Amino acid sequence: MKKALFFILIIAGWEAVSRTGIWADYLFPSPFSVLATLFNGFKDGTFTIAIIASLKRIFKGYLLSLAVGVPMGLLIGRVKFFSETVGSLILGLQTLPSICWLPLSILWFGLNEKAIIFIVVIGAIFSISLSTEAGVRNISPLYLRAAQTMGARGWRIYLEVIIPGALPSIITGMKLAWSFAWRSLMAGELLSSGVGLGQVLMVGRDLADMKQVVAVMLIIAILGLTIDRLIFRLLEGQVQQKWGLARL
Amino acid sequence: MKLLVKDVIKSFATGDRVVDTLDNVNLKVEKGEFVTIVGPSGCGKSTLLSIIAGLEKPTDGKIYVDGREVAGPGPDRLVMFQESALFPWLNVLQNVEFGLKVSGVDKRSRREIARHYLKMVYLSRFESAYIHQLSGGMKQRVALARALALNPDILLMDEPFAALDSQTRSLLHAELETIWEETGKTIVFVTHNVEEAVTLADRVITFSARPGRIKKEFHIQLPRPRNIETPDLGRAINRVMEELKTEVEKVVKEELDSDWAVEESALLYSNNCRMGSGL
Ligand SMILES: Nc1ncnc2c1ncn2[C@@H]1O[C@H](COP(=O)(O)OP(=O)(O)OP(=O)(O)O)[C@@H](O)[C@H]1O
Ligand SMILES: [Mg+2]
């Protein structure tokens, strides 16, 4: 309720500022003109096509970084050799914003889909690896000993104890990685080409159509938030229910 | 003879120092016997259990079960730890099923076995609860069911009831005794609590302080079930306590400053009180 009121106030303020005419309408569009742009964009399909293209990319990139990042984190967390080599490399690479890889990525993959997906993977993979590693390291040795005395060996220990034991930390990392991936995707789409939300936003800029720019910004924010709520809140909720952890 | 601990020596290298933890421990346990081990803190009781379990290798010496040398951990010798070590990502029933699952028992039969043992510890109603929803005593009951479900010959228990209040502990003593009598398991039970050791044991073994070695054995031949009213129980407790006292003193002297002697009598007195508090 408080939230709804707050957002109504913001929209009212936005409308009020646009009415004062400090900025021309094409520089500071009113909420209603943005709404109209949104409506038209969905009606003629430009937004829908762009959303689908962007989501496809991010899912490909995100799933790839999960598929590589989790095993990598397990190795770093369990094998000393990997933690001393790959582990320290990742810590270094993690500080580099993933968009810095764009020039190389375009050289390697060409100005296409793959180059952007690569940026998304780079953006997400390190936080997945690092949180998996942290989760693995923090598993109580007691759990491993208990599993061993009950006859668990080798891969079964990984499957039945180490991965489920590290899961709360992995999910935290996945959530963080999602927001990194989303940002990387937008940066990549803005700076390169191909259908997508970033591209629609750039077209808006080129046409000096701020209604379109703001409309796409809204879509990006709402989409990112929705997926965060739908998927990650659900996963976190399940873990909390089992482990009895306090809500973060 | 079920279990033989032969000439076991264990030392840990920590940095540049070598800590001698177990010094030539020899122990024979008969099939179906209930043996408890008491000793001052840090004398290597947990280490000995880990070695028997196969979780840790002795520096020297060997462990034999039924005449065969122990090479690693195995479900014929299950350990029950002080903290329950139950898995928080599984519910109660799944925890009890765990060992059966990794040894390849099919879903229907392992479910049946797990339910049987949960019933034995009176927790059938909680089979779908998660671990954080259980009290300390319930957790240890689940841990016991989880250990029993694999039908081990030997149960190794490392202060399993130390964190419980004395009423819950007495209740669990009685239940453990009943289960032991019904199943005929061989039990090696480590504890700080002399009264607990004497109440449960066929034989109490006292350990000396660092490096740990077996100091004395007490055969307890009082009728079961034992409780505060059992004649001579108090006397048996006192005999073991008397034996331990000198060892506890030795540890304290080693760890505390030299002016400790002034408080000695007071400390021993409170120590006695704590050890008898479960009665
Ligand atoms: N992994 C290890 N590395 C180095 N030292 C160890 C290790 N495990 C045990 N020790 C040492 O061995 C000694 C015995 O430890 P242990 O846990 O077996 O004692 P305990 O008799 O079980 O004590 P408590 O009654 O407090 O549980 C201690 O002094 C401890 O410092
Ligand atoms: Mg111990």
Image: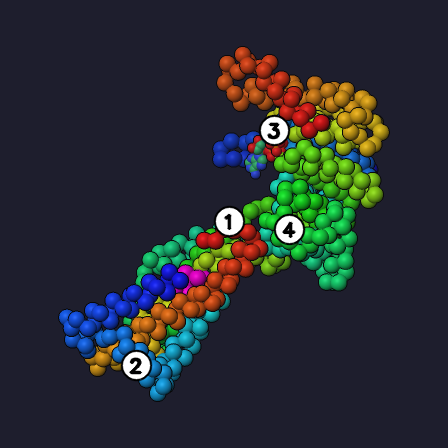
Measured as percent of width and height from the top left, residue A136 is found at 51, 53
Looking at the image, tell me whether mark 2 or mark 4 is earlier in sequence order. Answer: 2
Query: Crowding at label 3, few (<14), some or many (≥20) Cα neighbours within 10 Å?
Result: some
* Quarter assignment of residue A242: bottom right
> Which residue is under mark 3?
B41
Q: How many angstroms separate mark 2 from mark 1 (CA)?
A: 52 Å
> Which residue is under mark 4?
A147
Label 3 residue near ligand 1, CB within 8 Å: yes
Numbered marks: total: 4
Chain name for mark 1:
A
Query: Crowding at label 2, few (<14), some or many (≥20) Cα neighbours within 10 Å?
Result: some
- The part of the chain drawn in magenta is A174-181
Task: Report helix, strand or loop for mark 1.
Answer: loop
- Residue at the left extreme? A22
Chain name for mark 4:
A
Q: Is residue B3 above or below residue A38?
A: above
